[in-house]
Amino acid sequence: MQVASKTKIIDKLTCFLLPIIKILFPEMRKNKQIQKEISMNMIANILGLGNAATPLGLKAMKSMQNENPKKEVLSNSMLMFIVLNTASIQIIPTTVIAIRNSLGSENPTSIIFPVWIATICAAIAGIFVAKILIKKSKI
């Protein structure tokens, strides 16, 4: 991810994810650096690179905390970020495939489609509930 961040790959993927990031993180619309950090974390999660996603997520969360006016309370963007990381949409669940392979599974990749369904459903449900709670907290 560090190599990719020094190339234009992350910039291109960030541009692809930017419309989604702007909807999910409206407080961060003007902060390009935080958008890039969120994008890098999302890309690492999507690619199933959990070990790379963790430090990227911590960096993004620290940057969002620096922008947070109420330091003792999570901002709406921080809440949404936690929801997305918990759902962890993955195209290639590398860790689970590796575990299944090491345990002698005949078809360790057979879980890919169910993982897609489960993580997408979890993300949609989490985003939906988070948006409802965010709206209720503003009332």
Image (cartoon, rainbow, N blue to C red):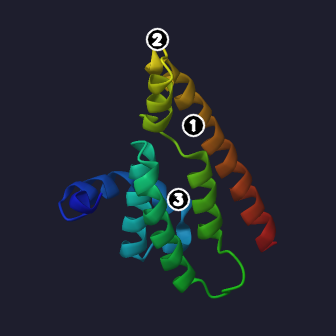
Q: Secondary structure at mark 3?
A: helix
Circles 1 and 2, Cβ within 8 Å, touching? The answer is no
Task: Find the distance from the CA under tag 3 to the CA under tag 2.
Answer: 41 Å
Q: Residue 23 — which label?
A: 3
Q: Residue at x 46, y 20 (%)?
A: 108
Q: Residue 120 — which label?
A: 1
Across and down, in percent, residue 111 comes to 52, 22
Callout 2 crowding tier (Cα within 10 Å): few <14, some 14–19, many ≥20: few
In the displayed structure, 90 sits above or below 27; it is above
Task: Find the distance from the CA under tag 3 to the CA under tag 1.
Answer: 17 Å
Q: Residue at x 55, y 59 (%)?
A: 24
- Residue at mark 2: 106
Task: Give the mark nearer the N terminus: 1 vs 2.
Answer: 2
Task: Give the mark nearer the N terminus: 3 vs 1.
Answer: 3
Q: Is residue 33 visible?
A: yes
Q: Amino acid at mark 1?
A: Ile
**Image quadrant for the N terminus?**
bottom left
Across and down, in percent, residue 91 comes to 43, 35
Q: Is residue 42 visible?
A: no
Left or right: residue 66 versus residue 52 is right
Q: Residue at x 47, y 70 (%)?
A: 60
Viewer-side label of 1, 2: 2
Task: Give the mark nearer the N terminus: 3 vs 2.
Answer: 3
Q: Residue at x 46, y 49 (%)?
A: 50
In the displayed structure, 75 sits above or below 48; it is below
Across and down, in percent, residue 30 comes to 42, 76
Q: Secondary structure at mark 2?
A: loop
In the displayed structure, 96 sits above or below 3; it is above
